Amino acid sequence: MRVIVIGAGEVGYHISRFLSREQDLDVVVVDTDREKLSRISEELDIAVLEGEGGSPKVLKEAGADNADILLAVTNSDETNMISCLVAKALFNVKRKIARIRNDEYYSNSTLLSDANLQINPAINPELESAKAIIRIIEAPFAYNVEEFEEGIIKVIGFKVKEDSIIAGKTLIEFRESIKEKVLIGIIQREDRAIIPKGKDRIKPNDIIYLPIHMNDIDRVASIIDGAIRDVKNIMIVGGGRIGYHIARTMEKGNVTVKLIEKSPDRCKFLSKNLDRTVVLNGDGADRSLLEEENIGDMDVYAAITNNEELNIMSSLLAKRMGVKKVISVVNRTEYLPLAHSLGIEVVISPRIITASSILRYVRRGDILSLTAIAEDMGEIIEAGVSAQSKLANKTLSEADIPKSALIGAIIRDDEIIIPGGEDIIRKGDRLIIFALQESIKRIENLLL
């Protein structure tokens, strides 16, 4: 399969890093920035080409005549759309995926339709990031929340507290103590990820990922995390697209939302387009402003400006001033470990979210959705089981599942099965699979 990536920025780099692990892909990255291309060619051993992504000559040189997928992920919506248009009109590239941030473009189904640009899908990083943050706000006990089957099943990431019932127990001991059929898909422990077995022991500060039916979330969360509290007060710093999407969604519920934005012009837009949100013109790192707005009463503080240094510093300030849960948006991946090490509970990377959203389209097998977790060390894959799949009509114990992967749930019609070794995988099932990077290729082969 030949894949052309237009754009060598952070999103293009992360996509290229994902794709470089795929042995059967022929990938070339196109950009006008020689320095960004050098980073990719030196670190990832992927072909690069300097030039405009919308140039017919450049696309031809990149091999568009034989390309299966074009991924347009520059910072310019217009460049991305033109690249897709040229790929369609001149080279008949089968699938074109574009990063589109402008809501006016993104929501225009006629513009993106097969009759016009034929972009399938368009991915809006800010909207996807806002959805990720909203899921975490709505589950304040969670470190991370991913949705599958239209929200019927959720994979919840919990950070294990010192006094948690699960701390210090093996998986077998934990299941016996709560008498519940629960399954831990991945454990993130410092800088590594583990697919756990029954005798593996869970330690404080581990992050554990569990697939849970939506109706069972509060019950399981109360067992692992203790008392469940409602979110009533939220403070958002940054009134850009992400902040606007979050405030617009959360103000519809029984929640008080305060939004701090530095730009007076943006504040005018927010005040005009938000109904119940209190819009404040100021600096989110201003201690006196935070004290004046009763920062200590906030259940959630989300720092989501375009400045990751400000996000990290203001999040630490908010935590010190008594906020119960702190969320920070960080685009530069080299800052992610720093943010975690400083004690920020939740760190969101829009660029990694975008890259993992795109990756499902270059994977083999019936991949329905895919999410990178545990700082990109593992993946949660939602996949369909075809009649030809090597997994069809086999029990879990018979299936050749690699040790660094785990089937966390089987969805059969309206039934959610947390499986054991004797459960049978059938044609038409959908599977939630936890996998470390080294097992991805074998999982793909099993799904074919």
Image (cartoon, helix red, strand yellow):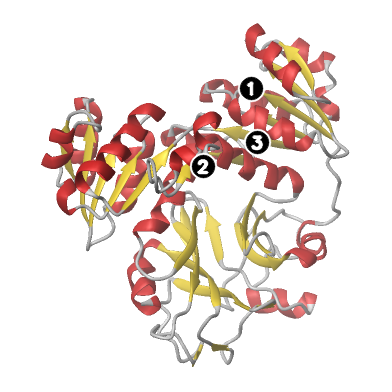
Which amino acid type is shown beneath numbered disc 3? Answer: Ile
Residue 29 position by quadrant: top left
Q: State the SS at label 1.
A: loop
x and y percentages locating residue 429 in the rendered image: 55, 79
> Is label 3 in contact with label 2 (beta carbons under 8 Å)?
no
x and y percentages locating residue 84 in the rendered image: 32, 40
Q: CA distance from mark 3 to mark 2?
A: 32 Å
Residue in view at x 34 percent, y 58 percent: 362
From the image, tell me which residue sits under label 2: 109
Q: Few, some or many C-alpha atoms within 10 Å of disc 1 (few <14, some 14-19, many ≥20)?
A: many
Q: Few, some or many C-alpha atoms within 10 Å of disc 2 (few <14, some 14-19, many ≥20)?
A: some
**Which of the two discs, 3 and 1, sits closer to the camera?**
1
Which amino acid type is shown beneath numbered disc 1? Answer: Gly
Q: In screen coordinates, is 289 left or right of 401?
A: right
Earlier residue among tags 2 and 1? 2
Q: Give the vertical position of 22 relative to 127 (above or below).
A: below
> Is label 3 in contact with label 1 (beta carbons under 8 Å)?
no
Q: Which labelled disc corresponds to residue 238?
A: 1
Q: Give the vertical position of 406 relative to 281 (above or below).
A: below
Residues 251 and 206: in front is 251
Q: Few, some or many C-alpha atoms within 10 Å of disc 3 (few <14, some 14-19, many ≥20)?
A: many
Q: State the SS at label 3.
A: strand
Residue 324 in sight here = no
Q: Which labelled disc corresponds to residue 227?
A: none
Earlier residue among tags 3 and 1? 1
Identity of the residue furthest to the front in this view: 115
Q: CA distance from mark 3 to mark 1?
A: 12 Å
**Which of the two discs, 3 and 2, sits closer to the camera?**
2
From the image, tell me which residue sits under label 3: 327
Q: Give the vertical position of 262 relative to 102 (above or below).
A: above
Residue 75 in sight here = yes
